[in-house]
Image (cartoon, rainbow, N blue to C red):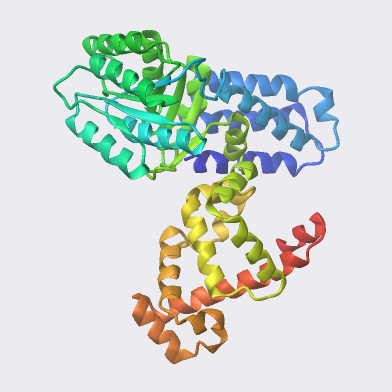
Amino acid sequence: MFEALTDKLNGVFQKLTGRGRLTEKDVDDALRQVRLALLEADVNFRVARELVNRVKDRAVGGEVLESLSPGQQVVKIVHEELTGVLTGHDHKLVQGEGEPSVVMLVGLQGSGKTTTAAKLARHLAQSGQRPLLVAADLRRPAAIQQLTVLGNELGIPVYQEGTSSTPVKVAKAGLKQARESGASWAVVDTGGRLHVDDELMEELEEVRRALSPQEVLLVADAMTGQDAVQSAQEFHERVNLTGLVLTKLDGDARGGAAISITHVTGVPIKFTGVGERADALEPFYPDRMASRILGMGDIVSLVEKAQQAVDETKAKELERKIRHATFDLEDFLEQFQSVRKMGFAQVLEMIPGFSQMRDRLPQDFDEKQIVKFEAIIHSMTPQERHDPDILNGRRRRRIALGSGTTPRDVNQLLNQFRQAQKLMRHLSKARTPKDLQSLFR
């Protein structure tokens, strides 16, 4: 989502860090460009102004301008101040003293509330909790069916009464069911509404009073820009929000709402939605998000994703194969599948410095290219996967025909595989950070 903003900020910072010394005018010119980049990304103008002013107050002091690396110091200050803008109160879910704890999801129509309810329940289940989904969205009949289907797919129980009841009755009965079944969390999906509709907002207030939830999370579509900030303010006034879930952060919007919303509303972002899959919900960490926006990557989140997607035994076996130069196309296929499981775009976003390397990748190198490579490998015999050197022209034509691709695609895959083999051989021999740096020069 932050691709355009990241590119512009990196352009500004490269000019700063490329100079040996900085003057106050250099800092002023750079921060003027930073402010413009933030405004173009749809960041609230007050937030952009305050952020730049705080950076300037810290950056024009002698400690920075007279340091050995003033450009790097300015980037560090921007990172710290941006982290401060993204930081609200507690970003973790607050659990009640007794069970079950209740989290109530609210939001505008079409914000992705029902899908988010299922994702959140899965997240709780993955962390050892026992969630129960409560289908209290009676204004959209398909919402009950949707939540039931998602719950069945994830193995999470769903309480529902159809559309003949009322949201307050369903919410109360759902909470009772959660208590009797020993659930540790009740995740309540409420009906989408317009924040200007008083009747619907009053209904939401009634549900809140009936549940006394530990968490009231607004599910906001990040692609709606500053309207997401406005709706968050109005929902907060009516139902006292405890947190936000920003959905569609994997989209191509400018992303300013994500930067502005906590600072303007005072309500912390607790989760972000980064895709349609059930596992595409991430806890929000302000410092990690600031690093991504500034093109510094997010190694911690990347490692966490890798731990979830990659079997530890397989990882050790892969390391052994790399060290003994027996890495083959079967292993290459497994790596493709792991990257797809983690989310191709999200993985690239977490790699430090990727924004500067993006232009070096082939233009068509994306998740579709990975799918194509998988099809090619699946069309090979076990012998061909273990020993790609036997792939002559006739075999390559047969593989292309079987995978619905062209011999040129097969050649491209084999070239990528050989480059990966070479890189991994070097990585296995690297002993110091300097050795690693030399591989990417």
Up the image or down, 234 lies above or below 422; here it is: above
Q: Is residue 82 visible?
A: yes
Residue under the image location 23 percent in, 31 percent down: 144
Q: Work out which residue is located at the far left of the displayed protein and give it.
A: 164
Q: Position of residue 287 (x, y in %)?
A: 63, 31
Residue under the image location 51 percent in, 84 percent down: 383
Residue under the image location 62 percent in, 37 percent down: 291
Indicate the quadrant where residue 102 lies.
top left
Indicate the quadrant where residue 205 lies.
top left
Q: Position of residue 413 (x, y in %)?
A: 50, 73
Q: How many marks?
A: 0
Q: Is residue 227 visible?
A: no
Identify the image quadrant of the C terminus.
bottom right
Q: Position of residue 285 (x, y in %)?
A: 58, 31
Residue under the image location 53 percent in, 89 percent down: 390
Q: Position of residue 329 (x, y in %)?
A: 54, 74
Indicate the quadrant where residue 304 lies.
top right
